[in-house]
Image (tube, grey):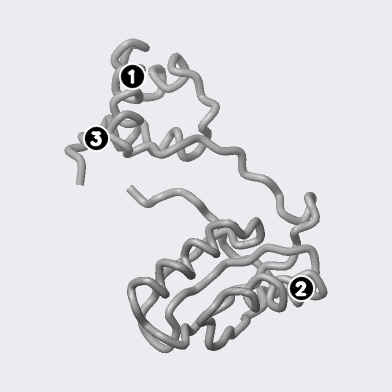
């Protein structure tokens, strides 16, 4: 873990709440002048603590209202096969998140699509074309209770 002091943590909290805050606005909130705030943010970016800035989009308003968690089991378990699966998944525009997990499954995918027919197309044409996929277990999200991208600090 990086050596982060309380001011760094506060900067990260503020930026996670609103990445469009100006350096001046942040400086006021942390009781510093703009220059040290700017330098701290640049250091956090340079060291990779801050990976990137994004706009959070409302999925339903862009036609991606169906969220599915898809648990994948591979037929074989070798470094090459796992790497190949990961490379294929990286190119899918419908897979928002992919985790290598322990337990009964090898990977958990978060898939966002328009509707059930679109998900069926994803399973048949994208997952179905990846070698060594043994099984896929789908869980459909009926309602989102909490959805927060921020990292607890």
Q: Quadrant of residue 124?
A: bottom right
Q: Which mark is residue 121?
A: 2
How many residues crowd mark 1 within 10 Å: few (<14), some (14–19), many (20+)? many
Residue at image coords 17%, 38%: 3
Q: Quadrant of residue 9?
A: top left
The residue that mark 1 highlights is: 37
Residue at image coords 58%, 57%: 91
Earlier in the chain: of badge 3 and badge 1, it is 3
Query: In this image, 94 relative to 117: left or right?
Result: left
Query: In this image, 139 relative to 81: left or right?
Result: right
Residue 140, horizontal then vertical, whole percent = 67, 77
Cα distance, mark 2 to mark 3?
A: 48 Å
Q: Which mark is residue 2?
A: none
The residue that mark 3 highlights is: 6
In this view, the mark in front (3 or 1): 1
| Observer-nearest of 45 and 17 | 45
Badge 2 marks a residue whose secondary structure is helix
Residue 34, horizontal then vertical, whole percent = 37, 12
Instruction: Answer above or below: position of 31 versus 63.
Output: above
| Observer-nearest of 11 and 106 | 106
Badge 1 marks a residue whose secondary structure is helix
How many residues crowd mark 2 within 10 Å: few (<14), some (14–19), many (20+)? few
């Amino acid at each position: 873990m990086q050596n982060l002091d309380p001011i760094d943590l506060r900067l990260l909290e503020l930026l996670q709440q609103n990445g469009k805050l100006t350096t001046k606005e942040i400086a006021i909130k942390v009781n510093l002048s703009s220059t040290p705030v700017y330098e701290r943010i640049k250091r956090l970016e340079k060291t990779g603590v801050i990976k990137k800035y994004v706009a959070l989009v409302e999925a339903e308003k862009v036609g991606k209202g169906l969220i599915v968690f898809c648990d994948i089991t591979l037929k074989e378990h070798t470094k090459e096969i796992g790497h190949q699966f990961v490379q294929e998944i990286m190119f899918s525009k419908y897979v928002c998140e992919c985790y290598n997990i322990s337990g009964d499954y090898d990977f958990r995918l978060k898939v966002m699509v328009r509707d059930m027919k679109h998900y069926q197309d994803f399973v048949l044409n994208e997952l179905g074309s990846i070698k060594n996929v043994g099984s896929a277990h789908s869980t459909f999200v009926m309602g989102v209770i909490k959805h927060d991208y921020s990292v607890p600090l």
